[in-house]
Amino acid sequence: MTVSFNTIPTTVRLPLTYVEIDNSQAVSGTPAKNNKMLVLGLRLPEGSVAAGIPTRITRSDYAEEAFGRGSMLAEMLKAYLTANPYSDLYALAVDDVEAPVFASGKIAIGGTAAVAGQIALMIAGTAVPVTVALGDSADKVASRIAELINRETTLPVTAQASDSEVILTAKWGGITGNDIDLRINYYMGETLPAGLDVVLTAMAGGVGNPDISSAISAFGDSWWTDIVNPFTDTANLNLLSSELQSRWGGIRQIDGVCWLAHRGTHAQSSTFSLERNDYLFSCMPTNISPEPPYIWAAVNAAVCTSALNIDPARPVQTLELTGLKPPAIADRWQWNERNLHLYDGLCAYNVNATGNVQLDRVITMYRLNKFNVEDTSYLDIETIKTLSYIRYAIRSRITQKFPRHKLADDGTNFGAGQAMVTPSIIRAELIALFTELETAGLVENFDAYKDSLIVERDQNDRNRINVLSNEDLVNQFRIYAHSIQFLL
């Protein structure tokens, strides 16, 4: 007998027909990869889902119910779903620290309204229009502002009027509250009603972040292909970096990319980034923009992963970050500043002709090798995503084709139909897989791959096959340079 069966023994004597089903040859082509997004963020006490429980989110209203209306996490999830409603999306809530220190800001009103009009107030990118009647005093306007802010429960702040001032307090503690933007007259043509003066004091004073070590423990061994993280303090980033490197390794193989954002001036963002060197982090510098950085991180992750899950090698440049407002025209970074950020480990974006934020280039925070020499091997996010997919495709192919096979040397004379594998059979399967990956536009240079591919049986462990391959990843069309040498 040469045919090898999985479930039908050779000792059967009872007649008649026994047919087993074997799926090892059923799947062909490159496999579809199931990507899972995990969003970290602070919940509010009224949320129905406790901290530390990964929870699937499919709708914005459930995000508010689960984590509290106006909470950081609920707003991140809502922004994500707006940009990418088809993702397999999970949330992992973090509780505030004990005795939190809350960020606060102020809106000071002066004068008396000489005409009826409207104050174009914006908080965290959300418009809070305040109607003003002729003759309204500063105290009355302040009271109306506080009332409108508290009525809009999705805002990340609460308000308290005190004479002609409105004191704003973040709904949660910590330094993330310092990034809540306050502004007036964002859009062209918006002006204050004559007779009134409005002075904003930026949000500040929030101290610390919660320790996310318990949240990382809650990751378990689930394969989170992407993680959105709003906490950018060094301690938490170090914890997350260590976890992601462990997941990237050849044993766990459940790799993921962390998406984050940083608010600040060009110099502040560069200073932050140059302290990191993480090939599994991708950070978007937001500049002084209306939406907070935790919203930018969620939207950037949503837009990029939506495209990269379709084709991990296709560049994400020119994709629009859905729902985000750019900084004011005077604050926007120039070409040289955006280019410098790409050398500092930061992504870059521009503002297109329709006033929307669109991606220039999305990179990782990796800049230097172990000898502090510039290293571009893990520069682009497409490289990380392509490598992750290729590894998944190899694992899928080998485990699907040879789940319970015996191993022998090349040249062994075994019968057809035997569940037997040799180095040359593995080699042929890898070459076939490469051609499929090449057809999918993920790799190139087949002949070089074939010539350099090493598949051999381990000399010490005869149950083991060792492989060395040199996949040449396709690159991205980034730059077109053209010199016109004209004639007269």
Image (cartoon, grey):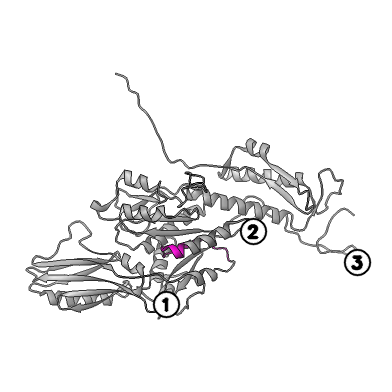
Quarter of image, res 268: bottom left
Provide the residue designation for mark 2: 251
C-beta proximity under 8 Å, tags 2 and 1: no
Q: Is residue 366 above or below residue 105?
A: above
Front residue of 66/362: it is 362
The 10 Å Cα crowd at callout 1, few under 14, some 14 to 19, many 20 or more, is: some
**Dot 3 corresponds to which residue?**
15
The type of residue carrying mark 2 is: Ile
**Magenta region, residue range:** 222-237
Secondary structure category for the residue under label 1:
helix
C-alpha distance separating marks 2 and 1: 38 Å
Distance CA(mark 3)–CA(mark 1): 61 Å
Amino acid at circle 3: Pro
Label whose residue precedes the other's in the sequence (2 or 1) = 1
**Residue 292 part of the magenta-drawn span:** no
Front position in the image: 287 or 443? 287
Residue 423: where, in percent of width, then height?
A: 76, 46
Circle 1 is placed at which residue position?
Answer: 65
Give percent across and percent down for residue 250: 63, 55
Q: Earlier in the sequence, mark 2 or mark 3?
A: 3
Q: Earlier in the sequence, mark 3 or mark 1?
A: 3
